[in-house]
Amino acid sequence: MSTSACAGAATEIATAQAASERASGRGVRSISCPPRCNGIRPYSTGPPRSGTRLEPPGAPWYTRAPGGASSSPGPRVGKGRPTSKPRRWREDEPGVSAKRTSDPNDTLEGLRAEIDRIDRDLVSLLAERRRVVARVADHKRRLGLPVYHPAREEDLISRRREQAREAGLDPDLVEDVFRAIVRASREAQARGLRAPGVRPGAKVLVVGGRGAMGARLVEWFSAAGYRTEVLERDDWGRARELAEGADLALLAVPIGTTAEAARRLAPHLPRGCVLADLASLKREPVGAMLEAHPGPVLGLHPMFGPTTRSLDKQVVVATPAREPERSSWVLEQLAAWGAVVVRSTPEEHDEIMGVVQALRHFATFVFGQFLCRTGVDLARTLEVSSPIYRLELGMVGRLFAQDPELYADIMLATPGRRALLRRFLEAAAENARLLEDEGGREALIEEFRRVAEWFGPFAGQAIRESSYLIEKLVERF
């Protein structure tokens, strides 16, 4: 078929396909070349117009023929006057963002331009999603709903993973992308929900409000439209003045001084003021607040440190002790900021925290102490370390970068915690038998299997979670 006949056939096909796709509401995307047309591929991103060549967007209307021979521009298509140069399409013209026909002869520059266009589209879609998220935050603010909705997020991730499989993509990669997007959305919603607060205009007094955790709480409550006051060690002479009209009094002081602070502050508080503490123990501090204050009492334990800038998915353990209906607004405010509020009793809390905090911190302390005593070259170990060693060593270093008095209080706060740590050391000493030459290896394997059976399904979950952390650590370091 001659070049002229090929172009004419292409025009007829383009016109027919344009009419068909206009009827179905679609624009023309590409037209296959008729047989024996010397490699000329007519294209269109819309119905053919008079005087318009059928050419690929952003590329000449002619291409190379098979075998590498160049095909010269053939005769014009349509009734218009021929142009001296092939028309170049702009990115903002209708249809340019549509899928394009794959061409093995595309240049590297052209493919990179195509990737750039796709990336720009992705950024535009993220901006559009952010605008919708802002509207979702407005609805949550109006309805008093929390930022974090676990079931909704996991359903979203599951559907995106399935979509990735259908598209031939790695589901883990798609999950990582969408978890980052969802986290950014939660943080944006939390910022939007800070003001107004659940009870805007209410007065919040923070005892120890210039300390690390106290200052963070002052920042969050102030941003949410609350009136905040701070009472420090030198301010007890003004305690009555500062506590006047308070709706919430937060004791952000060390564990050892919580009971004393409650006794000194309570006489100055209004009867309806919520008295709450932030200690990592609950039985004794909550008991002291109940004894000192006749009004609502609430125990709070933030399971994060003062370096946390967002409450997104952060756990706060709550132990309502008296008139819980009058302190519910405090928990609602924490949830509105994105926190996960877990209710407990003071007794249950202290028992669990013996393991979650005291035992974990003490085991980390012993590991770091041993490294120090043996004079290990930390820098050299990191040069040849596995990712899991670096992750564990990071947790050890994190402990020793913080306040020793705070962690001493956490580990040694009660006789019960000290007894737990003694049992831990006794158990570790018993393992000396596993180091014997005779039968030690077999005994270790047997004990390993027994403990693995005890962990059950959590072991598989731990593999997945720790693998994710290791991958992120490797990416960064």
Image: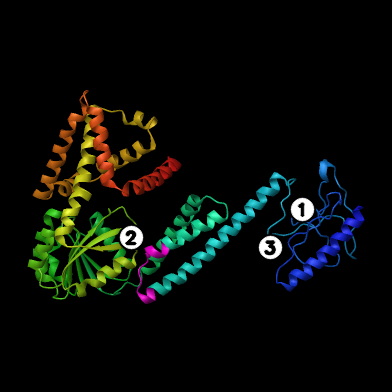
CB atoms at circles 1 and 2 under 8 Å apart?
Answer: no
**Label 2 or label 3, whichever comes before in sequence order:** 3
**Separation of marks 1 and 3 at Cα, in angstroms:** 15 Å
Q: Is residue 253 visible?
A: no
The quarter of the displayed image where residue 448 is located: top left
**Label 1 or label 2, whichever comes before in sequence order:** 1
Q: Position of residue 407 (x, y in %)?
A: 19, 46
- Mark closer to the observer (1, 3): 1
**Label 1 or label 3, whichever comes before in sequence order:** 1
User: Which label number is shown at residue 59?
Assistant: 1
Q: Which residue is mark 3?
A: 92
**Separation of marks 2 and 3 at Cα, in angstroms:** 41 Å
* The one of 104 and 325 positioned closer to us in this rendering: 104
Q: Position of residue 152 (x, y in %)?
A: 41, 65
Q: Which image quarter holds the C terminus?
A: top left
> What's the amino acid at mark 3?
Asp
Q: Which residue is mark 2?
A: 311
* Residue at 72%, 67% in the rendered image: 27
Give, as a single range, the part of the protein colored magenta: 141-153
Query: Dot 2 lies on which element?
Result: loop
> What's the amino acid at mark 2?
Leu
- 117 to the left or right of 3: left
Label 2: few (<14), some (14–19) or many (≥20) C-alpha neighbours in 10 Å: many
* Residue at 78%, 66% in the rendered image: 17
CB atoms at circles 2 and 3 under 8 Å apart?
Answer: no
> What's the amino acid at mark 1?
Ala
